[in-house]
Image: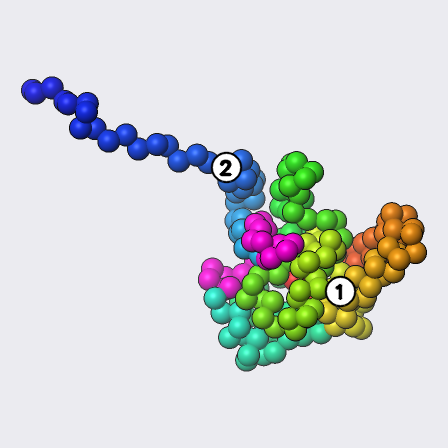
């Protein structure tokens, strides 16, 4: 057998796996049916949003089609959404499908954390097409975007967009009064406690 000429061997560098990819891999081990959504983050960057899958595979590609057919409900979610698996509606109703975001966010360095505890929920680029451009820019360029507890669930009598605008307005009012830190904490406590109450007692729809 002739010797192999090592000069003719092409060595391909191993692809480096980022820490984020490693952590998502661990999350997939813990949450077997994990789905990682791609949403617009603050200032328009793309972020990973890990969730337990509650919709059929390929649901994102049918989003606009469902909205055109059924319209949006009061909470700015598609009305009568057929993409949701019937066996997993309770996961959405009680916010269980969002649980993977907690370890995902807490195990990152503080400077690289994606989510705040309460705020405007992040949305995909496709989903943002249903909102006025002015509202979109106001939200994604604010520090009150990417909330784990979405403020669209705050008051069921208002639309999701109205709740989001009110939340941002209350924080901006706190900033003007030079009580920003204390007042912001109070605003967050008020919203998070009422949203938690709404989730536990089924005052709002899941999603």
Give residue 103's position: percent from left, percent from top: 65, 40
Q: For the residues marked 1 and 2, what is the alpha-carbon distance in whole angstroms? A: 34 Å
Colouring rule applied to residues:
rainbow
Q: Quadrant of residue 70?
A: bottom right
The spot of residue 148 in percent (x, y) is: 70, 52
Q: How many marks?
A: 2
Q: Which residue is mark 2?
A: 18
Left or right: 114 in relation to 24: right
Q: Dot 2: what SS?
A: loop
Q: Residues within 10 Å of mark 2 (few under 14, many from 20)?
A: few
| Residue occupying image coordinates x 69% and y 69% | 135
Q: Which residues are magenta?
A: 40-60
Magenta highlight on residue 161 = no
| Residue at the image position 66 percent from the left and 66 percent from the top | 136
**Looking at the rendered structure, which numbered label has been put on residue 164?**
1
> Which residue, as the protein is rendered here, is positioned at the far left?
1
Which one is in front, 87 or 193? 193
State whether residue 31 is above or below residue 70: above
Specify which label sits upstream in the sequence, 1 or 2. 2
Quick one: 196 or 87, which is closer to the camera?
196
- The residue that appears at 86% across and 55% down in the rendered structure is 175
The image position of residue 61, as x and y in percent, is 48, 66
SS for callout 1: helix
**Outermost residue, bottom side:** 69
Where does the image place residue 92, in percent across and percent down from the top left? Answer: 65, 59
């Amino acid at each position: 057998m002739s010797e192999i000429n090592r000069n003719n061997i092409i060595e391909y560098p191993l692809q480096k796996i980022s820490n984020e990819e490693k952590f998502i891999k661990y999350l997939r081990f813990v949450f077997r049916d994990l789905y990682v959504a791609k949403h617009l983050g603050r200032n328009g960057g793309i972020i990973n949003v890990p969730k337990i899958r509650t919709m059929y595979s390929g649901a994102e590609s049918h989003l606009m089609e469902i909205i055109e057919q059924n319209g949006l409900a009061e909470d700015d979610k598609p009305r009568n959404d057929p993409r949701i698996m019937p066996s997993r509606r309770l996961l959405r109703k009680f916010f269980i499908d969002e649980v993977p975001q907690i370890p995902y966010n807490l195990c990152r360095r503080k400077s690289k954390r994606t989510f705040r505890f309460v705020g405007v929920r992040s949305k995909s680029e496709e989903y943002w097409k249903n909102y006025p451009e002015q509202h979109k820019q106001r939200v994604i360029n604010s520090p009150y975007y990417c909330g784990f507890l979405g403020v669209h669930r705050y008051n069921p009598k208002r639309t999701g967009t109205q709740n989001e605008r009110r939340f941002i307005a209350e924080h901006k009012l706190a900033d003007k009064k030079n009580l920003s830190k204390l007042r912001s904490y109070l605003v967050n406590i008020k919203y998070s406690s009422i949203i938690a109450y709404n989730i536990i007692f089924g005052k709002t729809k899941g999603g």
